[in-house]
Image (spheres, rainbow, N blue to C red):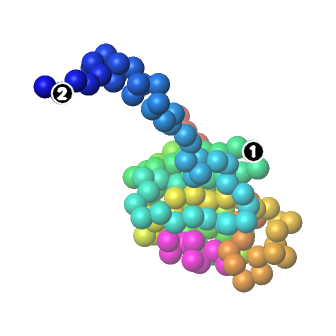
């Protein structure tokens, strides 16, 4: 007959040596070096501005309008207006629902992102509810 440690000792050893959960790198506040990030099937878009952030799910996205330097996303309760440069790639990826996050870089990064997309400003505009 084999002799080993009792189950009580094994259980206590497992609990003391178990690894503590750690935050993934993607959980950190993103830098401004990348205008947007694409994932395979994100449920929505995380919008980052200076020191604040908000998230909107794709199922609430009702439409988009792209103009030279302005991209307007119409959600069920609000609009998100993105101003910048070279936004057509972002527009195409948003239509495919592959964009996971968009980072406001600000106008001061315009010189660094000559041929790349530049997100100068992200603005939220709630839809007004008119009472009749």
Q: Which residue is the extreme one toward the bottom?
A: 115
Q: Viewed as shown, does residue 44 lie left or right of 50? A: left
Question: How far apart in space, not on screen, are marks 2 and 1 (Cα)?
Answer: 61 Å
Q: Which quadrant of the structure image shows residue 51?
A: top right
Quadrant containing the N terminus in the rendered view: top left
Residue 40: which quarter of the image? bottom left
Q: Could one spot residue 53 in this view of the protein? A: yes
For residue 22, the mark is: none
* Residue at 70% over, 43% down: 52
Q: What x and y, as percent, mark residue 119?
A: 71, 66
As drawn, 77 above or below 63 = above
Check the image and report above or below for 41 versus 27: below
For residue 36, above or below residue 22: below
Residue 9 location, x and y as percent?
A: 35, 19
The residue that disc 1 covers is 51
Residue underneath mark 2: 2
Residue 46 relative to residue 58: left or right = right
Q: In the image, residue 37 lies at what x, y percent?
A: 57, 64
Q: Nearer the viewer, mark 2 or mark 1?
A: 2
Q: Nearer the viewer, residue 87 or 12?
A: 12
Q: For the residue labelled by badge 1, is the local secondary structure a helix, a strand or a loop?
A: loop
Farthest residue, direction left: 1
20 with respect to 41 (left or right): right
Q: Which residues are magenta?
A: 86-93
Residue drawn at the location 52% of the way across and 54% of the way down: 45
Instruction: Mark 2: give few (<14), some (14-19) or many (20+) Cα within 10 Å.
Output: few
Question: Is residue 78 visible in this depiction of the protein?
Answer: no
Image mark count: 2
Circle 1 Cα neighbour tier, 10 Å, few/some/many (<14 / 14–19 / ≥20): few
Percent from the top left, x then y, of residue 7? Answer: 27, 20
Nearest the eye: 62 or 129: 62
């Amino acid at each position: 007959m084999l002799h080993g440690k009792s189950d009580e000792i094994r259980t206590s050893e497992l609990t003391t040596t178990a690894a503590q959960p750690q935050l993934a790198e993607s959980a950190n506040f993103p830098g401004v070096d990348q205008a947007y990030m694409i994932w395979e099937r994100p449920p929505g878009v995380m919008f980052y501005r200076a020191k604040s952030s908000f998230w909107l799910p794709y199922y609430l996205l009702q439409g988009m309008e792209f103009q030279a330097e302005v991209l307007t996303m119409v959600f069920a309760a609000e609009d998100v207006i993105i101003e910048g440069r070279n936004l057509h790639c972002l527009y195409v990826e948003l239509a495919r629902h592959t964009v996971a996050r968009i980072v406001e870089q600000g106008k001061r990064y315009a010189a660094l992102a000559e041929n790349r997309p530049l997100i100068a400003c992200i603005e939220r505009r709630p839809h007004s509810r008119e009472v009749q």
